[in-house]
Amino acid sequence: MGVAEQPAQVKSDTASSIRTAAEAQASGDRPLRGIAMMLLGVCLFSAMDGFVKWLGPDYPTMQIVFFRSLFAFVPLAFLIHRFGGIRIALRVTSPAGHLIRCFCGTGAMFLIFYAYANMKLADAVAIGFAAPLFITLLSVPLLGEKVGIRRWSACLVGFLGVLIMIRPGPGILESIALVPLLAALFNAGAMIYVRRLSRTDSVASIIFWFTVSTTLLSGLFMPFQWVTPQGWDWALLITVGLIGGGAQIAMTSAFSQAPVAAISPFKYTSMIWAVLIGWLIWGETPGLNIWLGWPVVVASGLYILYREAKLRALTVTAPATRSRGPGTSPAAR
């Protein structure tokens, strides 16, 4: 499925999860290349989602998570090498943080894969866009960040959009729509802990230990949930991992080459792919509630992104303003 991580899709793939750390190690500002890599990553993740939905009715969700994690190691080896290699990857300063990040990330991956298999693909993707709203909420108690009235208002509007999509009623607690919403919450928790880990641990470490821990955790279920793949299903399950790892590389590259505000909005193109794949393969079309609700959630997420980018810019320019002395601030000019 990441590192916010999401706004974006709710998938708990490590690429979306490690984006904050990747930004910290960014080596350049090439927005066009960054946008191209983001679009490639979204395309690959969308293809992976389609494979997951195809395999979902025949194989346990945890088995798909296992293949997704295990075979992601193949392409991710190159990414780990790029960000310092295995020696750097093995260094951990916050084991507890990695464990919590693993729990949240694995939970998010399991839940969204389950949602793909049991509801319309576009519906699950659309509800997953709620992740940035949860990130904003969790950033206050877990990161100590200050959230102003504008972002709180955007969150409120965004959650109204979520309510439109999930259509709460007497049977809401039994609704499958709660599964991708819960996945968004878990994904937000994973993203929050990636932000915390990126202060002390390397990108290579965050990638490596998440992939290792997810593989081991899902592997614990294999003696009880293993279904031997038939025919081409072996290739499809392996492809899920290879494509997922490749998508992580593309997205991590995107965030290392361009500002987050320039490329994050393009992650919402995943809705286009979800609608197209769902319609072509399964004849699915999103309901009216999805068409009405997801633009509200996307708009809220984009506004939160805009405000965060603006506040970061003000934080960066503030020291320079003070060093110039009074009367020379941007406002004064």
Image: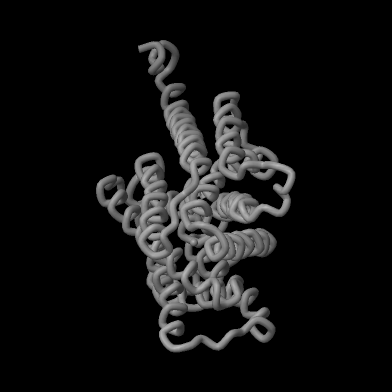
Tell me residue 278's x, y (percent). Answer: 42, 59
Tell me residue 265's x, y (percent). Answer: 39, 42
18 on left or right of 214 = left
Q: Quadrant of residue 63?
A: bottom right
In this view of the protein, can residue 93 be seen by the observer? no
Choose between 294 and 250: the one closer to the eye: 294
308 on left or right of 155 = left
Tell me residue 113's x, y (percent). Answer: 55, 64
The residue at 65%/74% (across/down) is: 217
Task: Check the image and report above or below for 230 versus 277.
Answer: below
Choose between 287 and 53: the one closer to the eye: 287
* Colour basis: one colour
The residue at 60%/65% (across/down) is: 110
Choose between 142 and 306: the one closer to the eye: 306
Q: Assign the C terminus to one quadrant of the image.
A: top left
The residue at 71%/54% (across/down) is: 174
- Tag count in the figure? 0
In this view of the protein, can residue 309 be seen by the observer? yes
Task: Check the image and report above or below for 198 versus 136.
Answer: below
52 on left or right of 249 = right
Tell me residue 251's x, y (percent). Answer: 39, 57
306 on left or right of 218 = left
